[in-house]
Image (spheres, rainbow, N blue to C red):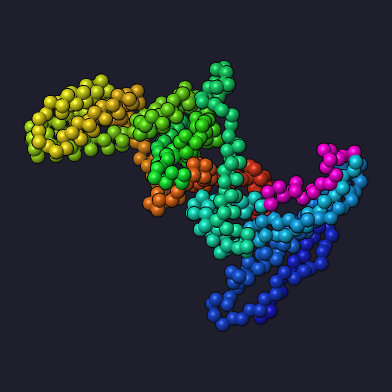
Amino acid sequence: MQVRIMLQIIGDDGTVGDAEEVAALTKITERAEDLGLSLAESKALLAAAQQRIVEAQVNGWLEKHRHCQGGGRKLRCKGSYPLTFRTLFGDVRLKSPRYYLPKERQTNGRATISPLTQLLPDHVAPERLYLETRWASLVPYAAAADLLADVLPIASGVNATTVRQHVLRTAERMEGCLAEQRTSFMEGTDSRDWEDLPVPDGRMVVGLDGGYIRDWRDRKKNFELIVGRSMPEEGEARYIGFVHGYDRKPQRRIIDHLRRQGFQADQDLTFITDGGDEVRSLAERISPCSEHVLDWFHITMRITVLRQFAQGLVHHDKDDGMAALDELRRIKWFLWHGNTYRAREAIDDLVLDLEAIDSRYPNLRKFRTAMRAFQVYIASNESSLINYGERYRSGERISSAFVEATVNAVVSKRFAKKQQMQWSRRGAHLLLQTRTRTLDGSLRAAFEHWYPGMVNDNTKDHGQAAA
């Protein structure tokens, strides 16, 4: 069977061009793999069609932009230079003409212009940039380049370095779209404006936690990533992430993130963190309706470690060990019910009791050290302790367990903690911006904001909706 695929282009003015052959195939039918187009045939067909379609579009655009502004005089051509436009369906090679400018329009010694650079400033099609960004946010750069080359006719123009450059360029554009420096939703807001705010949708919960990855500059050290997830009562959850210390204005980032999610200044906001100084400071003064809650999961995790020490003590000194276990149960009960005063009192008493114990228990010193650390931990986060039992019975979140899963999803599965991949702070920070938006599904919306034409997918349904 002989198959010839023809392409005919009709101009904006209705001019019908000649039908041009873009592919000629010889097909046999003996096995299942012979049916339809093969991957190689489809790549060749798409690349050939893309070359001719883009050429026709560019020629039409250049014809409209060749005339002098104001006078309407046709500009004289000085020649052209080659330009490669990287698209999803192949690298399209074009001729970019240069035109002489009239003397009255020449500035700073500039006598010619190249109009095509206005249409193609980055030499990359937005949809290709989007797909590279999306895939490289999910898998390593080299794997993303291989995947693109496997399914699209772009093998000659894609590699790990190119993909990385495109992804980081996209992330830098996201960084440039951040709002001005603000540390609170109240900055620049008149209190009288509150009366005009609609009724908020409900409480929003933001969980923040840290993760560590290998430092490329000092390979014996790690640096910290802060990642989180914001969860409204209604609507989709969103991810946020940045490199601690690299981002000098993290509160501005959180405010911008919440605004994009529809948060308003008079809405209840709860931050749940592990109580670390870095993440706790981020939650301060963000909103007048915000609160910081110490994660119950991290409290119980520390108490569990203390209980293990106390159980070890039981084997060497039963009375002291059982007394320590009982006191830890009381401490946990006080904390669960928000009785901070009694909890701190019991913690102080247990610290003194442990200091007075004379036992051969080999881990007694570690037990004392862990107990003192717990004493400092609770004292430092006293203002963030709540009545966890009451909050739990009312169906509200008291744990950042969902953030632990977020750390795994955002950090471990892409930054390859187990494989000891190494990162620069800039590279990790920028990749976090595209990865978080890819994971929560908001990356496409960002591209459609930058490139409104991406909303139009030329489908029949879209055409009917637009009509």
Q: Is residue 384 above or below residue 101?
A: above
Q: Position of residue 140 (x, y in %)?
A: 49, 54
- State the residue at coordinates (18%, 26%): 350
Q: Is residue 247 above or below residue 410?
A: above
Q: Position of residue 179 (x, y in %)?
A: 58, 31
Q: How many marks?
A: 0
- State the residue at coordinates (15%, 31%): 324
Quarter of the figure with residue 36: bottom right
Q: Is residue 244 left or right of residue 460?
A: left
Q: Main secondary structure of the magenta part?
A: loop
Q: Position of residue 189 (x, y in %)?
A: 57, 21
- State the residue at coordinates (56%, 82%): 30
Q: Is residue 114 left or right of residue 362?
A: right
Q: Is residue 422 left or right of residue 130?
A: left
Query: Does the magenta segment cover residue 9?
Result: no
Please name whichever residue, 96 or 264, is drawn nearer the observer in this view of the structure: 96
Please name whichever residue, 52 or 310, is drawn nearer the observer in this view of the structure: 310
Query: Does the magenta segment cover residue 106?
Result: yes
**Residue farthest top in this picture:** 192
Quarter of the figure with residue 370: top left
Q: Position of residue 281 (x, y in %)?
A: 42, 27
Residue 213 seen in the figure? no
Residue 245 seen in the figure? yes
- State the residue at coordinates (43%, 34%): 206
Q: Is residue 135 above or below residue 322?
A: below
**Residue farthest bottom in this picture:** 30
Q: Which residues are magenta?
A: 104-123
Q: Quadrant of the N terminus?
A: bottom right
